[in-house]
Image (cartoon, rainbow, N blue to C red):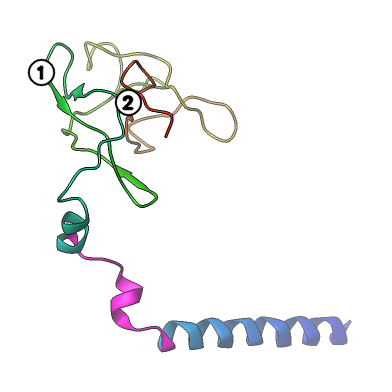
Amino acid sequence: MRRPVLALASVALTLVATAAYALTSTSPALAAGPTAAQLLAKTATCSQVSNGKYATDDGGAETVAICKNGSAYFWTADMDIDCDGISTSRCNASTDPWYQAQTSFTTSTGAYFTSDVTRYFVVPLPSSHSSRR
């Protein structure tokens, strides 16, 4: 029984050493990712791919276009709190007047999200503004 354990320990040690080398040999700037200023610079101009614009709130002015830069899509959003999904003491019909028990997407097990546990973003659903690009 010792040989398989030693072989496994040897493989694990090799993987740890390889990962440690990769972490120390990567430049700190690459490991940290882009700064907020760098991301904002990439989104300074909009190559609009939506057929129209969206409103940030129901009934509001349609001022938000979906844009594309390379393979990335981006748009300006406001920061509403969406309490849809599985009802909890913090997210339910009493705490959110527009509460819905379902979410458009589901977890890997097919359940709706629990929004006060699993944070998620609401992305506009396809509409007449959507593009097939």
Question: What x and y, as percent, mark residue 22?
Answer: 49, 83
Question: What x and y, as percent, mark residue 40?
Answer: 16, 55
Q: Which residue is mark 2?
A: 124
Range of the magenta residues?
25-36
Q: Quadrant of residue 5?
A: bottom right
Q: Nearest the camera: 116 or 103? A: 103
Q: Quadrant of the N terminus?
A: bottom right
Q: Which residue is mark 1?
A: 61
Q: Nearest the camera: 89 or 117? A: 117
Q: Quadrant of the C terminus?
A: top left
**Is 5 placed above or below 60 here?**
below
Residue type indicated by callout 1 = Ala
- Please report the residue visible at 39 percent of the width from the left and 50 percent of the height from the top: 71
Asked if the magenta segment contains residue 28, the reply would be: yes
Q: Quadrant of residue 37?
A: bottom left
Query: Which comes before the other along the chain, label 1 or label 2?
Result: 1
Residue type indicated by callout 2 = Pro
